[in-house]
Image (cartoon, rainbow, N blue to C red):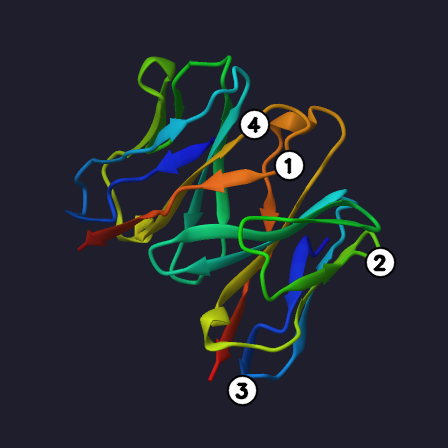
Amino acid sequence: NAGVTQTPKFRVLKTGQSMTLLCAQDMNHEYMYWYRQDPGMGLRLIHYSVGEGTTAKGEVPDGYNVSRLKKQNFLLGLESAAPSQTSVYFCASRESVGPAAYNEQFFGPGTRLTVL
Amino acid sequence: AQKVTQAQTEISVVEKEDVTLDCVYETRDTTYYLFWYKQPPSGELVFLIRRNSFDEQNEISGRYSWNFQKSTSSFNFTITASQVVDSAVYFCALRGPSGTYKYIFGTGTRLKVLA
C-alpha cells in the first residue's frame, strides 16, 4: 500500500514550457486535491476533484489545468510555465464514505518545481 | 468566510522546554472539523490530530496535547518537554460540515528546538 505518490519529485522548467504532474493513490479515495506551498503562505488549493471525471477550481487555479480520467489518478498540468509557478506541489486524497466528514487528507511527498 | 490564523511565524525553544502553538479559526458553520499537520525538514505532511466541533475534550498523546476552546475559536497545540525531532513546520487546518470539500490551512508555525 503506497498511499499517495507523486511524479516527478523534482523538475526544472524554462518559462513557457509545459509539463504534467502525476498524482496516484491506491486507497480508493473519491476526493483528490492539488495544493501549492509557498514560503509564508501555507497550503493553497489549486484544483480538486470529488470523483472520476469531475474537477473544480480551488483558491489559485489560474495557469493550471487538471484531469481525473481514472479514479486513482489526478493530473496537474502547466500549459505555459511562469516563474510565479515555482513552488512545492502537494497532492492529497481522502475518503468520502463512512464517517466521511471526520476524515483527514492523506498527502503525497510533494514535487519541487522551479521555473527559470 | 472561513479563515485560519497561525500568528506565530517562527518559535525557537531550547530542548526540554514546553511550547504552545496557537491556532485561531473563523467559521459560520456550527459543524466543522479541525486538524493539525506536521511538516518535518524532509518535507512530507504528517497528520497529527482531528477534532470535530462537538467534541471539546482536550486530547493528550504522549508529549503532545491539544486544547480546543469554541468560546475563543482556538485549537492550540502544546508540546511538553520538546525534543530536537519536534523541529518542523506545523499547520492547523479547518474544514466545514459533511459535503464540504475544501480545507483551509493556516500559514504554519516553524518550530525550532535547539539542543
Confirm or deny contact between disc 3 and disc 2 (CB under 8 A): no
At which x and y percent is residue A93? 66, 47
The residue singled out by tag 3 in the image is A14
* Cα distance in 3D space between marks 1 and 4: 8 Å
- The chain holding disc 2 is A
The residue singled out by tag 4 in the image is B96
Is B53 on the left-hand or right-hand side of B13? right
Question: Residue type at mark 3?
Answer: Lys
- The chain holding disc 3 is A
Residue B101 bears which disc, if any? 1
Asked if both marks, 3 and 4, belong to the same chain, the answer given is no
At which x and y percent is residue A8? 63, 74
Q: Secondary structure at mark 1?
A: loop
The residue singled out by tag 2 in the image is A69
* Cα distance in 3D space between marks 3 and 2: 28 Å
Crowding near the residue tagged with mark 2, few <14, some 14–19, many ≥20 C-alpha atoms within 10 Å: few
